[in-house]
Amino acid sequence: MYAILGVVVVVVLILGGLVVIGAVVDTQPTPKATTTGAAPTSQPTGGKVADKGDFKAFYSTSSDPTNRVIESAARQSNLVEEISLGLNEAFALPYDVGLGMAECGDPNAFYSAKEKQLTICYELFAFLLEVFENDTDRVAGAFTFIIFHELGHAVIDVYQLPAVGREEDAADQLATLMLIKGADDDGASALAAAEFFDRISGGQLNFADEHSLNEQRVFNILCWLYGSDPGKYVRIVGSGVLPVDRAERCPDEYKQLERSWIQLLEPHLKG
Ligand SMILES: [Zn+2]
């Protein structure tokens, strides 16, 4: 129970940094209208889209005893409400999108375009506590990464954003970018996400899966974190964790994903 409450505190701290993303976006030049692209729909003056909806918090009732402990702690600490609050301060939505926790039968998280709903399973929270042996900071870092990853699927659907290439990789990009920009933690949350995928890697390789392999997700996150500030994160390469061959291209990879996501999200961010 105490571990969960600690996680909530850290998640709220990270989400507090979301407004920073809005500030960063405001410093970027407004993308020029193109003659080839479709005309933007319902854009009021100022280039911002009207805010007509919110992330709406929900909890489903669980029956499994372990899930019930997680559910009770999440409800008591207003975990989902706090997450929704943070996201609603940053994002303008054209309609309400559900964001909540549910009993799923699997340690999972997913976004349903049909139901306009982002669900984090109680089982995932329990699994993260197990993987990180109740280390509050790392659980919160990986948990927030997963929420931001699902948020990536949500914004691609809700804003009808173009996603060429793998949407799963685009969602990982947004999650890493938001942690780098929003979490004032010297990369600790992004590193926790990389460590999470590292710890669950090593099983049967599923090349047909829509996600990149866990091993690849580890190196992508490390690459983007390093690329965001090579001087600050030189230890990631120096320690041999990220191969030099990949590291050389990471600053450009990061710049490209940052520019792309900021351009795509700019009309939809408040601030
Ligand atoms: Zn995904």
Image (tube, rainbow, N blue to C red):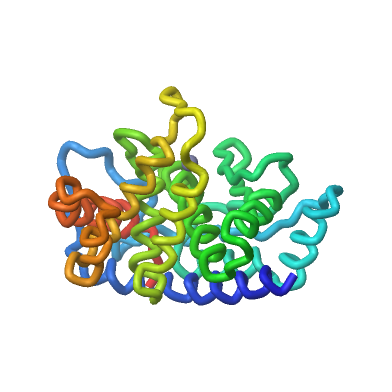
Q: Total marks drawn?
A: 0
The quarter of the displayed image where residue 224 is located: bottom left
Tell me the quarter of the image containing the N terminus. Answer: bottom right
Location of residue 46 in the rendering, given as x and y in whole percent from the top left corner? 29, 65
Question: Is residue 269 in sight in this rendering?
Answer: yes
**The C terminus sits in image quarter:** bottom left
Percent position (x, y) of residue 260?
25, 51
Q: Residue 250: where, in percent of width, then height?
A: 19, 52
Vertical order, 59 against 73 (above or below): above
Image point (36%, 68%), residue name? 187
Q: Residue at x 35, y 44 (%)?
A: 170
Q: Which is more toward the observer, 79 or 238?
A: 238
Residue 85 against residue 215 in the figure, above or below: below
Farthest front residue in view: 239
From where the camera sits, is residue 99 visible? no
Side of 253 relative to 121 (left or right): left
Percent from the top left, x then y, of residue 266?
31, 59
Q: Residue at x 74, y 56 (%)?
A: 59
User: What residue is shown at x 70% (from left), y 52% (from top)?
Assistant: 122
Q: Toward the viewer: 142 or 113?
A: 142
